[in-house]
Image: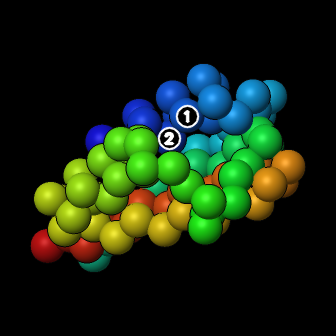
Amino acid sequence: MSTQESLNNALRHAGASAIAIHLDYTLKQLQITITDNGCGFEMDRLTSGFGIKGMRQRADLIGAQLHIQSRLNQGTQIELSLPLG
């Protein structure tokens, strides 16, 4: 799932010293937000690696929306929203 990949990326690649995981659950939606204080990256300069591409594919498979915000030297926030019901 995208959550595991997000945590792996924050630990392995971003050099994050803090990672926050926020879970919101209602009868209509599950939302997971992962924020780190790592090195971040420029979204328009992503390489063709499988990491984020794979996260998007897995989100699509379960009908979820994946939003990624990252800024160089400012960390990353990944939000996965899954409609329920």
Please provide percent x and percent y for residue 68: 54, 63
Residue 10, relative to residue 80: is it above or below?
A: above
Image height of 27 relative to 75, above or below: below
Q: Do the residues labelled 1 and 2 touch (CB within 8 Å)?
A: yes
Residue 79 pos. (x, y %): 50, 61
Q: Label 2 is placed on what type of residue?
A: Ser
Q: Residue at x 61, y 67 (%)?
A: 44
* SS assignment at label 1: helix
SS label for mark 2: helix
When the figure is inspected, residue 1 is found, relative to residue 70, above or below; the finding is above
Res 30 quadrant in image: bottom left
Q: Nearer the viewer, residue 83 or 39?
A: 39
**Which disc number belongs to residue 30?**
none
Amino acid type of disc 1?
Asn
Q: Position of residue 12 (x, y in %)?
A: 60, 24
Horizontal side of 61 relative to 71 (left or right) equals left
Q: Residue at x 62, y 60 (%)?
A: 45
Q: Residue at x 27, y 66 (%)?
A: 64
Q: Look at mark 2 in the image and give the residue it sits on.
A: 6
Q: In this view, does 26 lie above or below 15?
A: below
Tell me where residue 57 appears, x and y as whole percent.
24, 56
Corner quadrant of residue 39 = top right
Q: In this view, does 4 lie to the left or right of 47?
A: left
